[in-house]
Image (spheres, helix red, strand yellow):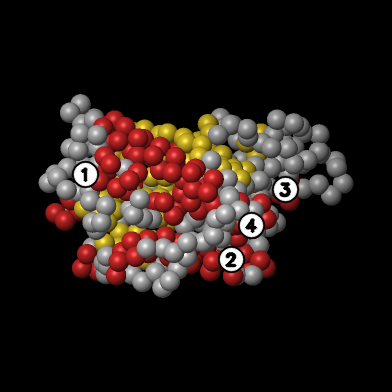
Amino acid sequence: MEETLSTFLRATEIPTQGARTLPGEWFTAPAIYEREMERFFHARWLCAGRSADVASDGDYIVRAVGTESIIVTRDETDTLHAFHNVCRHRGTRLCDQSGGHFAAGIQCPYHGWTYALDGRLVGAPHMTGTDGFDRTDWPLLSVAVAEWEGWVFLNLASDPEPFATAFAPLIGRFSRFRLSTLEAAHRIEYDVRANWKLIHQNYSECYHCSPVHPALVRLTPANSGENDLYDGPFLGGFMVITQPGGSMSLSGRACGHPVGDLPPADAQRVYYYSIFPNLLLSLHPDYVMVHTLWPQSPNRTLITCEWLFNPASLADASCDPQDAVMFWDMTNRQDWDICERSQLGVSSRAYVPGPYSARESLTAAFDREVRAVERVSASETRSTVPIIPAV
């Protein structure tokens, strides 16, 4: 959203209202972790990956969300679908790869039941003559799916909030970055021994940047910038790049063409937004970095990090995407190390919640969102396997 339509506030202008950090059991207790998976990851819209990963009919990706496995694919009419990775015959998992291409529909490896890309059961060997059997009664079970700015989103709830309603504060906000046109230059998978909330909290403040990220603060002051989203499930704002025409890279120079139609002010800014519960979006003038978080246990999170560039940058030998990749891989690993140290600390019986500083207002806001969702009754957020046919 353009500045004229936004209200930016410095972190210190957003009251923390005496907020304290979350209790230790919120990062360690299996029961709390399972409740969060149910209420957050099984009932909110999750980023599953880029639309480019399922660009053509038959392309597919598989995403594990807690104990659930979801297939995302595209059919011959360019319609996106998502299904539970479960055969309707005896429950066998259909796909065990993280992605690929369906050459002739989705076939169960156990007894050969075969499904069209829109989920219809089109083949069931030796079921002819079975009393009461009708193939139309046994499509794959659907999961809600949506596309936004070149990303695929899933919602496992049986009656999900419409995506356009849930994401209303973000619709059109980043149009100047032309996110749907960007192409991935690199991807790194990280296995972090820390609770998913610690990753979010760390991302939402730069109070830690001076001691943890000396290279970063040489490029952008730790106390620079302002926030325009500071309450609710979407949080963030910008920080200022010190060097005119510079970027967040090892060299400090821009490593690609502008990602979109950016006003002059954006040439000196990096926008950082956390999108609850599993997307971290970092918008640079010359590239976009994206983290998606996949909790595995109370103290373990898998993180996918991707660097997206203007296609012109990838075709230009004078551009060096690795300049950004290497900078942020170094910075990411510094963050993961400090998050793992935090996990060890909050796991101690000596830990008690501490006070947030005025520079941690977004972290306190993230905690408020976590607590607010926790207060919603389990009956309102319960995620059950839909029994509505896929077609």
Left or right: residue 288 compared with residue 262: right
Q: Secondary structure at mark 4?
A: helix
Mark toward the start of the polypeptide (2 vs 3):
3
Mark 2: which secondary structure? helix
* Above or below for 4 versus 140: below
**Residue under pointer 2:** 374
Give the quarter of the image for residue 55: top left
Q: Earlier in the sequence, mark 4 or mark 1?
A: 4
Kind of residue indicated by mark 1: Leu
How far apart, in angstroms, are the residues tagged by discs 1 and 2? 38 Å
Q: Is residue 176 left or right of residue 354?
A: left
Label 1 vs 2, first from the N-terminus: 1
Cα gap from disc 2 to disc 3, whole angstroms: 35 Å
Q: Which residue is mark 3?
A: 138
Q: Amino acid at mark 3?
A: Trp
Label number found at residue 219: 1
Question: Which label is found at residue 32?
Answer: 4
Q: Residue at x 44, y 55 (%)?
A: 201
Q: Earlier in the sequence, mark 1 or mark 3?
A: 3
Residue 147: image location, x then y, percent: 44, 52
Task: Kindly indicate whether the residue at mark 3 contacts the one at mark 2 (C-beta within 8 angstroms).
Answer: no
Please state the horizontal and vertical placement of residue 225, each as a whole percent of the image: 24, 58
